Each structure stands twice: as structure tokens, then as C-alpha cells.
Image: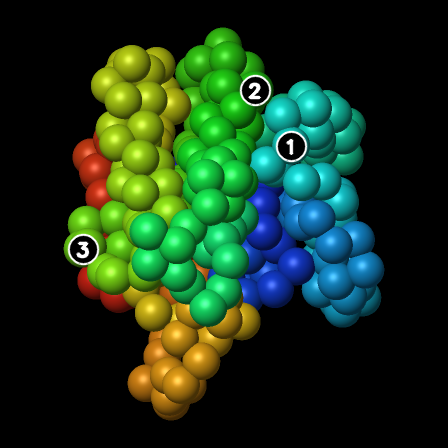
Amino acid sequence: MDVKNQAVLVTGASRGLGRALMEVFARRGARVVGVARDAKALMAAVTPLRAQGLAVHALAYDVGDKQSIYPLVGSATALVGPLDVLVNNASSLGPTPLPLLLDTACEDVSRVLEVNVLGPFRLTKAVAGSMVLRGRGLVVNITSDAAVSAYPRWGAYGVSKAALDHLTRIWAAELEGSGVQLLSVDPGDMDTRMHSDAIPDADPATLAKPEDVAARILALAETRDAPAGQRFEAAKWEAA
């Protein structure tokens, strides 16, 4: 998919990978809507991009809130038109320091699943119908190596990302032949606040920069031969 002039929605856009994705898509010529819960932080991310003449918009919504989904999609569509690309990037770790499963509250697991699994499911459901009618569209779900490796203390997050991976595969199987592409992308370890919250003593010098990862994800999004529903590691793709 050539993303130039395409309508793109990126969740979790106020910082880290989400903010970087907003910028790389916009610089490629897309019309981008960034979504995050914190309106002030989101505007701080969007304002410098708009000052550069990039077509970037901000919407403050919580993707973990079921009642927010259709208002979010309606507002985004009003700003940039029917969505061509959805990037489900928003994620929750749950409480930090990360607890053992025995010490994890059921309510905390529920909240992580609402944001990391049900949010992407609801958003995809809200936009996929229009994509199918137009015969084209792309949904990128941001996953993690915690989806495939059993890291102690990463229980709620790991379970949510494993579920998101399989959700991607099922969507892809059900939408096969429709022109709508579903991909799952593991960005790897990045120098972000989320990573710092999870692993405070990690050396930032050993971590990937969100800007570099975003460029790789854009390159993957624009490839024409990515198998539907497949799980990719961003580090294995070269940016254009």
C-alpha cells in the first residue's frame, strides 16, 4: 500500500512509537489522526508536526472504553475521510513494578485486556466494514515478544499480546480476498517510557529508537507481498 493521500489512524499517539508513527506516515503524505487518552500530551506531540505543515490531527479518547470507539471513528472520519490504515498501537502494561501473576488483581488483568485486545478488536470491527466495501485497507496490530516468550511478571501484558496476535490471524482468515490486510508487528525493545516503566534499569543505549522502528513499520506497511495475518519483527525490515 502506498500511504500517500491515505487516511491513517494511530492509537497511543502522544509519545513513543505512536508519536513516531504519526510523523512517518504524515511525512509520507498521509492524512493522520493520532489518538491518546491524555489530551494535553497528545497536543504537545501533534502541534510541532502541524507547524511543519503536516496533515496531523489529535483526538483524545480512551481505546479501552467501549463507549469511545464509535465516537472516535466518527470524529476521525470527519477529519480525514474513511480510514485506509488503522494502527493499533495503544497498550497498557498494567501496574508497575510488574507483579507476579499471584499478586496481580483480576481488575488489572481486565483493564490490560480492554486496552490491548478489546480496544483493537472494537476499532477493527468499526472500520473493517468500510474497508471491505471499498476493497482495500490495512490494519497493523503492534505486538511484543512477550506474546511468544513467557517472561515472569509480564503475565497480563504477555497474555494480551498473545491474544492480539491470534486475533490478527483470525481477522485475516475471515477477511481473506476482501482487499483488507491484517498484520501483527513486534517492534522490539525501544527507548520509550513504557519500556522504562517496565525495566527501569535498562540501558537506553541498547534500545531501538522509536523513530527508527516507525520507519521500519512504514516500510512493512507499504510492502505488497506481506502474507495476511503474519507476525513480523520490525528489526528485520529495512526502511525505504
Q: Is residue 149 left or right of residue 28?
A: left
The residue at the point 61 percent across, 54 percent down is 13
* Residue 168 visible to an observer of this rendering: yes
Q: Quadrant of residue 229?
A: top left
Q: Nearer the viewer, residue 113 or 34?
A: 113
Q: Is residue 222 left or right of residue 107?
A: left
Dot 3, crowdedness within 10 Å: few (<14), some or many (≥20)? Answer: few
The residue to which callout 3 is attached is: 149
Q: Position of residue 179 (x, y in %)?
A: 36, 20
Q: Which mark is residue 126?
A: 2
The residue at the point 53 percent across, 24 percent down is 122
The residue at the point 39 percent across, 60 percent down is 99
Q: Position of residue 151 (x, y in %)?
A: 23, 60
Mark 2 or mark 1, whichever is nearer to me = 1
Whether residue 119 is situated above or below residue 70 in the rendered picture: below
Q: Nearer the viewer, residue 104 or 36?
A: 104
Whether residue 146 is situated above or below residue 4 in the rendered picture: below
CB atoms of marks 3 and 1 within 8 Å? no
The residue to which callout 1 is attached is: 65
Q: Which amino acid type corresponds to the residue marked 3 in the rendered image?
A: Ser
In primary-sequence order, the first of circles 2 and 1 is 1
Q: Is residue 35 left or right of residue 214?
A: right
Q: Which amino acid type corresponds to the residue marked 1 in the rendered image?
A: Asp
Whether residue 182 is situated above or below residue 45 in the rendered picture: above
Residue furthest out toward the top: 133
Q: Which amino acid type corresponds to the residue marked 2 in the rendered image?
A: Ala
Q: Position of residue 133 (x, y in %)?
A: 49, 10
Give the quadrant of the C terminus.
bottom left
